[in-house]
Amino acid sequence: MRKALTVATMLAFLAPAHAEDALTQAISFAITGSEGRQVDVVDKKNCVFRMGVRTYFLNNVLTNTITFQPYTRQIGNYTRVGVHGKSKIMEEVYQGVAQPVTDVDLMVESPDHARIIRAWQYIYAHGCKGQTSPF
């Protein structure tokens, strides 16, 4: 009985780590079209993540206003993801100065438009809360 309890305790401890890995993978794919890019967790509770010079404040996103548009260029297939918020949703450091952004169109390179949409849905179903616009 003691072994069963120990295994159950270990499995319960490992489950959230797997969910966190899936969340960071979903964020990486939603923003870049690639799971291989490193996402740094800045503040998991408030859903703040950093990739390079950009910090994303995903709890500030108005989730019911996110838009997705397939876009083809000569150099590849993209999805234009329109992300909006009442307050800062992204901060980009340019020449040492942090610039807050409340509206952005992300050009996500990937031929899999539907998977990008699923990644954004996963983010808000498994960790981030976001906000909603009244209309």
Image (cartoon, rainbow, N blue to C red):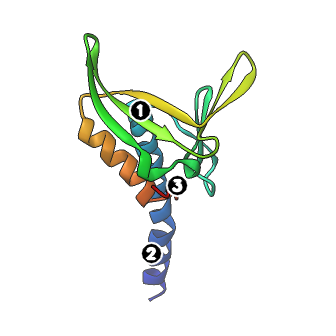
> Which residue is situated farthest in the right direction here?
96
**Residue drawn at (43%, 36%), measured in percent from left and top?**
82
Residue that carries the numbered disc 3 in the rendered image:
130
**Residue drawn at (44%, 89%), measured in percent from left and top?**
1
Please provide percent x and percent y for residue 133: 50, 54
Residue 113 in sight here:
yes
Please provide percent x and percent y for residue 120: 39, 47
Q: Is residue 54 left or right of residue 25?
A: right
Q: What kind of element bears circle 2?
A: helix
Please provide percent x and percent y for residue 99: 69, 27
In this rendered view, identify the residue nearer to me: 5 or 84: 84
In this rendered view, identify the residue nearer to me: 86 or 122: 86
**Residue drawn at (45%, 81%), measured in percent from left and top?**
3
Residue that carries the numbered disc 2 in the rendered image:
7
Q: How many residues crowd around disc 2 within 10 Å: few (fewer than 14), some, or many (20 or more)? A: few
> Which residue is situated farthest in the front direction here?
135
Residue that carries the numbered disc 1 in the rendered image:
36
The kind of residue on which mark 2 rests is: Val
Q: What kind of element bears circle 3?
A: loop
Please provide percent x and percent y for residue 116: 32, 40
Q: How many residues crowd around disc 1 within 10 Å: few (fewer than 14), some, or many (20 or more)? A: few
